[in-house]
Image (tube, rainbow, N blue to C red):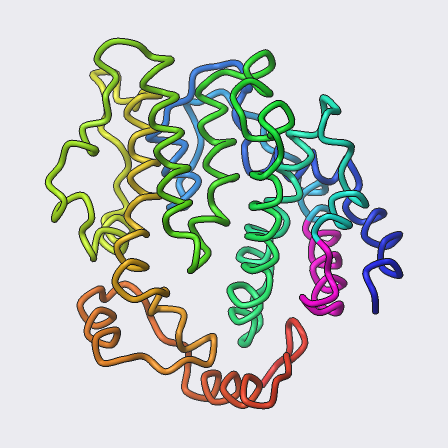
C-alpha cells in the first residue's frame, strides 16, 4: 500500500480538527495563564490530577473519537512500511504550508500522533516493538524535517508562538517537539542541543537570576548514568515555592534536566538497553549490569521476547495489536 493510495484515508482521519484536538488533549493548560509546573508535571508524567492550574480537558466523547482515529491512522501508517513513507510527502498531505499561521499547532499535533499516540494506544503484547522500532523512527524523521525548516518557518520557534501563548505554555510545546529527538537512539547530541535551547530561552526571557543550576553541577552528577531511572522512580517534580506551586523557571529547568538525563545512557551504550528485549537485540554484559542497577525497567514475558526475536529474524512485523 503506497502512501499515495493511503493519502485520502490519512487526511480524513488526521484532519486539522483532529490534530488541534490532539494538542488540546496533551496540553490542556490555558494558553495565557501561569502554569503550576509541579502539578502539570505530576499530571503529565506520573498520573496525577489537575486542580490549581487553569485548564480545559476534552470531553470523553472527544477523547474516544480522537483515540479511534489516531489508532486507525497508526495502523495505516504501519501497513505502509517505513521505506515507503516519504516524510516530505506526509507533511504535504497532512499539514498546511509552513508559512501558514496554523502550521505550528498542526505540526505539533502530527508530532504527538507519531510520538505519543503509539505509546498510549498500542497495548498489544508485541506492540512495544512498533512503538520504538517503527513509530519512533517515523516520529524522529518528522522531527528532523521540522527542525530543518528555515527559522521563519520553524514550528517550534518562540517567534511563531509568542503572540498567542504564554512562555509557560510554550515550554510544553518545546518539550513535545523535543521528545522524539530524545527518544531516538542516534540523536543524543541533537537532543542535548534542544534542551539547551529551551534553557537559554527561559533564562533570557526571565531575566537576571534565572540561571539553571543544573548546568553548573559537576559532570559526574549532571551526566549521571542512572539519572533517568532515578528521576522516574522518584516521581518527584520541581521544587515548590511558599504557595506550594512550581514556577515557570523551576518547571522548565526540571524538564530540561529530564531531557538531558537520557544522554549519558546513549553516550555509554549507543542505545537504550531497556529496549533490547522488545527490539530483538541481545544485551551486552555491561548493559545487563546497568539494567540490574537501574531496577526501574521490566523485561516482557519470555514468550513475548521469543516471538519478537522470531519476527526480527524473519524480517516481518506481527500486526499491531496481534496476540501471541
Magenta stretch prevailing secondary structure: helix
Q: Position of residue 239 (x, y in %)?
A: 22, 28
In the image, residue 160 above or below residue 92: above
Position in image of residue 14 (x %, y %):
77, 46
Task: Tally the numbered discs.
Answer: 0
Q: Residue at 33% x, 69% y: name it.
A: 273
Q: Residue furthest top?
A: 208
Q: Give percent across and percent down for residue 313.
A: 54, 89
Q: Nearer the viewer, residue 206 or 23?
A: 206
- For the residue pair 87 and 32, the one nearer the viewer reads as 87
Per the image, is 108 magenta? no
The quadrant in which the C terminus is found is bottom right
Q: Quadrant of residue 214?
A: top left
- Write down the region rendered in magenta: 67-86
Give the residue displayed 56% in from the left and 60% down from the top.
137
Name the quarter where the N terminus is drawn. bottom right
Q: Is residue 267 above or below residue 176?
A: below
Q: Residue at x 59, y 52 (%)?
A: 141
The part of the image, by quadrant, that contains residue 215 is top left
**Residue 115, image x, y percentages:** 56, 51
* Location of residue 290 with respect to 14 vertically, above or below: below
Task: Please state which of residues 256 and 157 is positioned toward the viewer in this rendering.
Answer: 157
Inspect the magenta stretch and tell me whether residue 79 lies in it. yes
Amino acid at each position: 500500500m503506497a502512501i499515495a493510495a493511503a493519502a485520502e484515508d490519512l487526511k480524513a482521519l488526521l484532519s486539522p480538527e483532529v490534530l488541534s484536538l490532539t494538542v488540546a488533549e496533551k496540553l490542556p493548560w490555558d494558553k495565557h495563564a501561569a502554569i503550576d509546573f509541579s502539578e502539570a508535571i505530576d499530571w503529565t508524567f506520573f498520573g496525577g490530577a489537575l486542580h490549581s492550574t487553569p485548564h480545559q480537558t476534552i470531553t470523553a466523547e472527544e477523547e474516544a473519537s480522537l483515540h479511534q482515529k489516531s489508532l486507525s491512522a497508526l495502523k495505516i501508517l504501519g501497513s505502509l512500511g517505513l521505506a515507503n513513507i516519504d516524510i516530505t510527502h506526509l507533511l504535504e498531505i497532512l499539514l498546511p504550508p509552513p508559512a501558514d499561521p496554523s502550521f505550528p499547532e498542526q505540526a505539533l499535533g502530527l508530532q504527538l500522533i507519531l510520538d505519543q499516540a503509539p505509546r498510549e494506544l498500542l497495548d498489544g503484547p508485541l506492540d512495544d516493538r512498533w512503538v520504538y522500532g517503527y513509530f519512533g523512527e517515523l516520529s524522529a524523521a518528522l522531527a528532523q524535517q521540522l527542525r530543518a525548516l528555515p527559522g521563519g518557518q520553524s514550528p517550534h520557534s518562540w517567534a511563531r508562538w509568542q503572540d498567542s501563548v504564554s512562555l509557560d505554555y510554550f515550554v510544553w510545546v518545546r518539550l513535545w517537539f523535543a521528545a522524539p529527538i530524545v527518544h531516538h537512539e542516534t540523536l543524543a547530541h541533537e537532543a542535548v542541543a534542544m534542551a539547551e535551547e529551551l534553557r537559554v530561552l527561559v533564562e533570557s526571557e526571565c531575566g537576571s537570576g534565572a540561571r539553571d543550576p543544573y548546568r553548573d553541577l559537576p559532570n559526574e552528577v549532571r551526566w549521571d548514568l542512572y539519572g533517568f531511572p532515578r528521576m522516574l522512580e522518584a516521581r518527584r517534580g520541581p521544587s515548590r515555592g511558599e504557595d506550594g506551586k512550581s514556577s515557570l523557571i523551576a518547571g522548565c529547568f526540571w524538564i530540561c534536566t529530564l531531557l538531558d538525563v537520557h544522554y549519558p545512557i546513549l553516550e555509554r551504550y549507543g542505545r537504550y538497553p531497556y529496549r533490547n528485549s522488545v527490539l530483538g537485540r541481545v544485551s551486552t554484559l555491561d548493559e545487563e549490569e546497568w539494567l540490574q542497577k537501574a531496577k526501574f525497567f521490566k523485561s516482557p514475558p519470555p514468550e513475548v521476547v521469543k516471538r519478537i526475536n522470531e519476527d526480527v529474524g524473519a524480517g516481518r512485523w506481527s500486526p499491531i495489536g496481534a496476540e501471541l
